[in-house]
């Protein structure tokens, strides 16, 4: 399986990092080794002094497809969960200055914790109006809603599938809202989807 990630998909997050608004979705990948096993803590890697949390809605791909039309895109995922795109911000900044890819700052081991369960699409009243938020040590750090995405789910799936075939079991991280920030040893992170706790982990 593969983890497909969408960058710069919320205007407020683009603004807080002083990036340009992209005309098309920004895509990068994480390998399967980026998944953090259920119940395991996240260990801050030695190569970074500035690891940031980025909470995201995650789509679970349920069937294979390529060149998918937007009008059929919703049949290619069957669940929505939460994930955290841990990012080595200091390393990413260095790579961006040199015009190099972000993978070293985004795709390292255990950089992609994902909720152990996904909410079935059939149980979500409006895919274009999903609330989610992240708490760090009980304090709300990030809040988002799928209505604020620059590129909604259907466009993401259609766009990605023109270049990369989707396969059952793939995960799509759909972008993070504003409020990203550093984590430190001892932090407890909890992610909520429509008020329901979906993901929880400790930072070591």
Image: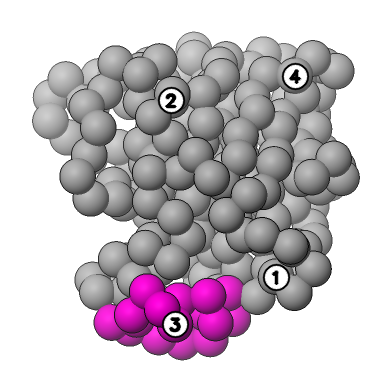
Q: Mark 3 or mark 4: which comes first in sequence?
A: 3
Q: Which mark is residue 13?
A: 2
**Image point (29%, 66%), residue name:** 159
Kindly report the distance in space between the C-alpha atoms of the residues bearing marks 3 and 1: 14 Å
- For label 2, the crowd category at 10 Å Cα-Cα, with few meaning under 14, some 14 to 19 and many 20 or more, is some
Residue 68 visible from this viewpoint: yes
Total marks placed: 4
Within 10 Å of disc 3 (Cα), the crowding (few <14, some 14-19, many 20+) is few
Label 1 vs label 4, nearer the camera:
1
Image coords of residue 151 (percent x, y): 38, 51
Q: Nearer the viewer, mark 3 or mark 4?
A: 3
Q: Secondary structure at mark 1?
A: helix
Report the residue marked by disc 3.
Answer: 72
User: What is the distance, in whole Å, between disc 2 and disc 1 at their CAs?
Assistant: 26 Å
- Residue 140: numbered disc: 4
Looking at the rendering, the stretch of residues picked out in magenta corresponds to 62-77
Q: Is residue 30 visible?
A: no
């Amino acid at each position: 399986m593969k983890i497909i990630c969408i960058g710069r998909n919320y205007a407020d997050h683009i603004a807080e990092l002083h990036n340009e608004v992209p005309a098309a979705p920004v895509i990068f990948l994480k390998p399967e080794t980026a998944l953090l096993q259920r119940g395991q803590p996240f260990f801050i890697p030695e190569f970074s002094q500035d690891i940031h949390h980025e909470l995201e809605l995650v789509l679970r791909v349920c069937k294979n497809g390529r060149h998918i039309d937007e009008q059929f895109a919703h049949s290619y995922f069957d669940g929505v969960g939460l994930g955290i795109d841990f990012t080595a911000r200091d390393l990413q900044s260095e790579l961006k200055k040199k015009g190099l890819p972000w993978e070293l700052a985004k795709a390292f081991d255990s950089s992609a914790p994902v909720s152990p369960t996904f909410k079935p699409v059939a149980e979500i009243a409006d895919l274009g109006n999903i609330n989610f938020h992240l708490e760090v040590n009980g304090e709300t750090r990030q809040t988002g809603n799928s209505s604020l995405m620059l590129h909604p789910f259907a466009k993401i799936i259609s766009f990605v599938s023109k270049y990369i075939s989707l396969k059952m079991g793939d995960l799509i991280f759909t972008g993070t809202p504003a409020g990203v920030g550093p984590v430190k040893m001892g932090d407890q992170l909890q992610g909520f989807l429509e008020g329901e706790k979906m993901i929880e982990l400790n930072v070591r």
